[in-house]
Image (cartoon, rainbow, N blue to C red):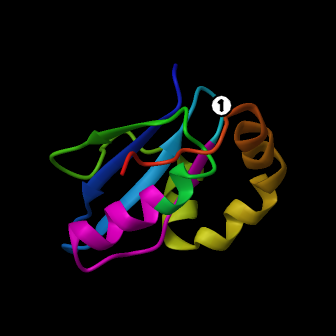
Amino acid sequence: MEPQFQLYKDRHGYFRWRLKTDDFIVSGELYRSEAGAKNAINVLKTQASGANLVRLDKAPEDLTPEERYIQACHDVAVERQGKLKEILDKNPPFRPKP
């Protein structure tokens, strides 16, 4: 699976994003607006340009227990920081065209 950013609205009406690969997931904070979540993705994409944005129409039903925990407490992602660094190191910084 190619790395991808997934953007969705959770069951409470907040926007969320997650960066997903075959064996790695990072989830962001809650955002009141889709624009806020997209901005967070764009900030991260400056360091992880290989990921694509995929807009989900609803919160994924297929969340693993790990994903549910990450959504409830995104600080767990710190444990995975080494893997994120690996992804970021493999991808040159994204620079939007002027």
Q: Amino acid at mark 1?
A: Asp
Q: Residue furthest front?
A: 98
Residue 15 % position (x, y): 28, 67
Front residue (pair 90, 84): 90
Residue at point 37%, 45% (across, down): 6
Residue 24 % position (x, y): 65, 39
Residue at point 33%, 76% (across, down): 31
Magenta span: 25-42
Residue 11 % position (x, y): 22, 66
Give neighbour class at mark 1: few <14, some 14-19, many 20+ (Cα, 10 Å): few
Instruction: Report whether 9 appears left or right of 28.
Output: left
Residue at point 24%, 68% (across, down): 35
Query: Considering the numbered disc 1 on the image, is that residue within a helix, a strand or a loop?
Result: loop
Magenta-drawn stretch contains 76: no
Q: Residue furthest left?
A: 57
Quickly name the residue at label 1.
23
Q: Is residue 23 above or below residue 19?
A: above
Front residue (pair 95, 46): 95
Q: Residue furthest bottom?
A: 32
Residue at point 55%, 57% (across, down): 44
Magenta-drawn stretch contains 36: yes
